[in-house]
Amino acid sequence: MNMMKAAIRGKQGLELAEVEAPTPGPEEVLVRVRACALNRADLGVLAGQMHGKVGGAGTVLGMEWAGEVVETGAAATGFAPGDRVMCSGKAAFAQYAVADVGRTMKLPGSSMSFERATTLPVALQTMHDALVTNGRLKAGESVLIQGASSGVGLMALQIARLMGAATVIGTSTNAGRRARLAEFGADLALDSSDDGWVEQVVKATGGRGVDLIVDQLSGHVANQNMMAAAVLGRIVNVGRLAGTRAEFDFDLHALRRIDYVGVTFRTRSVQEVREINRRMIADLGPHLATGRLALPIDRVFPFERIGDAFEHMRGNAHFGKIVVEMA
């Protein structure tokens, strides 16, 4: 097992290459990858951008995967060869990948497929952290998810509902996707490109505004978010799909006394990410086995066609997760 197949960022873009197989460190597990899922950050790395410390020529792409444990480090307790697991980290698009023991989770039961499991780690960790830890969501509050038709957005709707939110609102600029948000827990689905969406949020919350906004858009939407927020509302900045720069109304921010929190995994320590995963499993783990928390799979591509999977994501016509199946 010295060499393995992997999808890397080559000098000319995506390449399928033979690379050296990884070896687990003391607190890592080595996994035989059976399925992996695409995330938008993968597009950036493939385009030559850095995602934290990940990037550059020769980088093995991918952030989440599922498969079987092959080997464990000396201090990676709780796992054994043969365990079916799902993981997050780096270098997922390969026959073998290593994960920190704190970012590894056993599949709930034997019925969950690897294809289904690989859709979950990033969405679960990101949105539990955004909603519960940083967003401080309380039962009975109202929640708005900006960019709710993405995989992580759909998971946010479900987590908000599961954690007791009274009103759950999701946005999407695509009419077909908006029509499906109710399936995942949205009471109201709005078009964030329609200037009337703020008024609709205020109306849906009895005139007071929404308690918590999880924002995957940012950019020009930032001031509108504050207009839609309640006094003492919270906004958690998870993504910047609408832009990383825009005007910001500091007076509105002060008047509403809004807590505006930025989050990213890129500057978190190993210990911080382990704690995120631990909290998520404690709250949500029991609901994975029942299927109450699940994401739709848009398409499954064989590994040899991973380039087509990237093109499918670039086309932005998918609903749910794009999965790559390893032979």
Image (tube, rainbow, N blue to C red):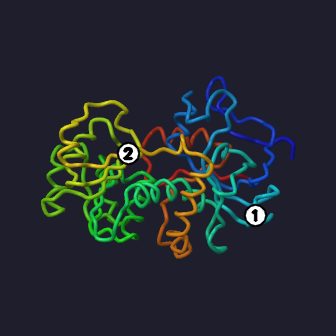
Q: Which mark, residue 146?
A: none
* Above-or-below relation of 187 to 305: below
Q: Nearer the viewer, residue 198 or 226?
A: 226
Does 124 sit left or right of 3 as displayed? left
Secondary structure type for disc 1: loop
User: What is the count of numbered marks?
Assistant: 2
* Above-or-below relation of 277 to 267: below
Which badge, 1 or 2, comes first in the chain's sequence? 1
User: Quadrant location of residue 19?
Assistant: top right
Q: Residues within 10 Å of mark 1 (few under 14, many from 20)?
A: few
Residue drawn at (46%, 56%) of the image: 129
Q: CA distance from mark 1 to mark 2?
A: 34 Å
Q: Nearer the viewer, residue 319 or 186?
A: 186
Residue highlighted by disc 2? 237
Q: Residues within 10 Å of mark 2 (few under 14, many from 20)?
A: many
Q: Position of residue 312 (x, y in %)?
A: 50, 42
Amino acid at dot 1 = Thr
Amino acid at dot 2 = Asn
Residue highlighted by disc 1? 77
Q: Position of residue 277 (x, y in %)?
A: 57, 59
Q: Position of residue 26 (x, y in %)?
A: 79, 52
Q: Nearer the viewer, residue 169 or 207?
A: 207
User: Quadrant location of residue 154?
Assistant: bottom left
Which residue is at the far right? 2
